[in-house]
Image (cartoon, helix red, strand yellow):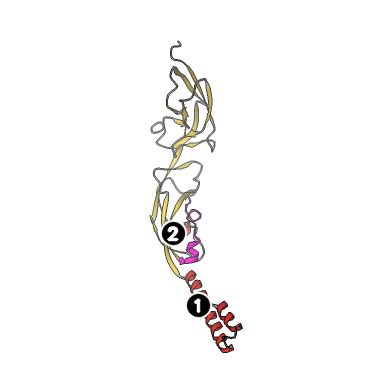
Amino acid sequence: RAAGVFKQFFSGKLSYRTLGLEVAGCLAAAVVLWVAIISGQGEMIEKVITVPVEYTATADDVVLTGDKANEAKLHLSGSKSDLDAVSPAAMGVKINLSKMNVGKQTVFINEENIRLPRDVRLLDVQPASITVDIAKLTRISLPVKPQLVGSLPDGLRLSSATAVPETLWVFVPSGDAGKSYKSITTTPIYLDNIRENTTFFCKVVAPQAVQPVEKRWPDVEVHVTIGAKNAK
């Protein structure tokens, strides 16, 4: 519109007075548009997002057992620009387990364990609380069982599948020792394409409550020995 006004002015079709009115009208429209944009960005709105629940490390001699919540829904309030900038992955609920006692405990979710951005308010959260079960640990030795999947090609038989080391020292919740946990396994070994004696390097697969004594699981070698079905 402004370009058309100036074109008419230089062609002699508009007076200075008319030009001034037209320019003022354009400026007023621009100001109204700018105010509308700024007001929209500053408008207070509400938003519900789903965020992850993180559990910090427990003390050395205890472990988190049982089912646990992995997500929470946060009902937030703030300006549109602030809420649009919220990243659910970076704003998770953090549950500090390091100073908790053995047994079941209830942790309430509030602003203290949520990384809320400045000027964003927490109106509600579901669930409002999380129950955690902390168990004392007992050290036991468990055999390592290779996880074999599928079958060998025709004409071949499995002679042996041996893990090295054959056993590992682990921590399990007290009271469960010798009951729930009979062995730990390796990552899968697929037999379908094995045609000769082979050594595999595998990771350990264990229930969440079973913890390595050395802080991290070692790699495990699995020696797979095969032979012909008609061999004696």
Q: Label 1, on which residue?
A: 32
- The residue mark sitting in front, 1 or 2, is 1
How far across and down, in percent of the image, does residue 145 sit? 45, 27
Task: Tell whether position 109 is magenta.
Answer: no
Q: Nearer the viewer, residue 10 or 33?
A: 10
Which comes sooner in the sequence, label 1 or label 2?
1
**Which mark is on residue 182?**
none
Tell me the residue at 47%/50% (across/down).
54
Q: Nearer the viewer, residue 99 or 202?
A: 202
Q: Nearer the viewer, residue 169 or 157?
A: 157
Task: Tell whether position 90 is magenta.
Answer: yes
What amino acid type is highlighted by mark number 1? Answer: Val
Tell me the residue at 42%/24% (across/down).
151
The magenta span reads: 78-96
Tell me the residue at 54%/37% (across/down).
216
What amino acid type is highlighted by mark number 2? Answer: Asn
Q: Residues within 10 Å of mark 2 (few under 14, many from 20)?
A: some
